[in-house]
């Protein structure tokens, strides 16, 4: 038997009335068979949604932030709004709060940001500014036309600098 994502869905017409034909939704993450209880918009204002399990929605939100230039706080806020809407059929909203909050902890944000700017934990404000200026020049969209990798890196560098300087 092949590992089809839809194996838990009853076949059309096999059941009569009352039964919800899509009672189990699986995580949209490639190759994941966990229940996908956490909706995430495909883009910030899109009505199209992905549905992920908790670990994958956390991973998605982390990347999503960089792709759309949102701050992590904004990305988390949006993700939590989506999760609250889905809490009705999940039954327990406490399930996600611990992990999701930890993912976006202040210390981790700082560590991530330093890593993006290629700095050590004891970096000074001058170090941060110097590294920021160097990387912004390196990855600026004007000098990397159509290069998606650079565009993402550029967003990361800007977000990292905001985290470290509070600007
Ligand atoms: Zn998953």
Image (cartoon, helix red, strand yellow):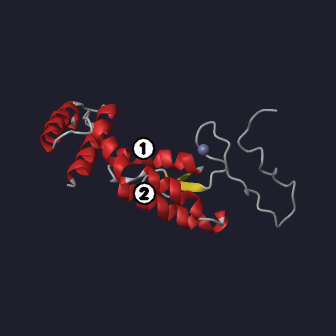
Q: CA distance from mark 2 to mark 1?
A: 12 Å
Residue 146, x across and y down, in percent: 29, 33
Which residue is rendered at x = 48% and y = 65% of the image?
Answer: 81
Q: Quadrant of the N terminus?
A: top right
Which residue matches tag 2? 76
Total of numbered circles in the picture? 2
Q: Quadrant of ligand 1?
A: top right
Which residue is rendered at x = 55% and y = 58% of the image?
Answer: 96
Q: Is residue 137 left or right of residue 28?
A: left
Q: Is residue 98 left or right of residue 120?
A: right
Ligand 1 contact, mark 2 (Cβ < 8 Å): no
Label 2 crowd (10 A; few <14 / some 14-19 / many >=20): many
Which residue is rendered at x = 74% and y = 35% of the image?
Answer: 3
Tell me the element at label 2: helix
Q: Is residue 79 left or right of residue 27?
A: left
Residue 138, x across and y down, in percent: 20, 31
Which residue matches tag 1? 63
Ligand 1 contact, mark 1 (Cβ < 8 Å): no
- In the displayed structure, 142 sits above or below 163; it is above
- In the displayed structure, 107 sits above or below 115; it is below
Looking at the image, can residue 139 be seen?
A: yes
Q: Which mark is residue 131?
A: none
Looking at the image, can residue 48 be seen?
A: no
Q: Quadrant of the C terminus?
A: bottom left
Residue 18, x across and y down, in percent: 82, 67
Which residue is rendered at x = 45% and y = 53% of the image?
Answer: 102
Tell me the element at label 1: helix
Of mark 2 and mark 1, the one earlier in the sequence is 1
Label 1 crowd (10 A; few <14 / some 14-19 / many >=20): some
């Amino acid at each position: 038997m092949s590992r089809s994502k839809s194996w838990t869905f009853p076949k059309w017409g096999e059941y009569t009335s009352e039964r919800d034909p899509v009672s189990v939704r699986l995580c949209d993450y490639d190759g994941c068979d966990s229940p996908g209880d956490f909706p995430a918009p495909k883009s910030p204002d899109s009505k199209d949604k992905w549905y992920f399990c908790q670990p994958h929605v956390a991973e998605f939100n982390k990347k999503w932030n960089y792709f759309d230039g949102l701050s992590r706080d904004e990305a988390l806020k949006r993700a939590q709004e989506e999760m609250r809407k889905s809490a009705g059929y999940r039954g327990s909203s406490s399930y996600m709060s611990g992990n999701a909050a930890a993912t976006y902890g202040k210390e981790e944000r700082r560590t991530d940001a330093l890593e993006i700017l290629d700095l050590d934990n004891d970096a000074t404000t001058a170090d941060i500014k110097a590294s920021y200026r160097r990387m912004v020049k390196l990855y600026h969209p004007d000098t990397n036309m159509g290069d998606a990798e650079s565009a993402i890196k550029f967003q990361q560098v800007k977000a990292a600098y905001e985290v470290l300087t509070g600007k």
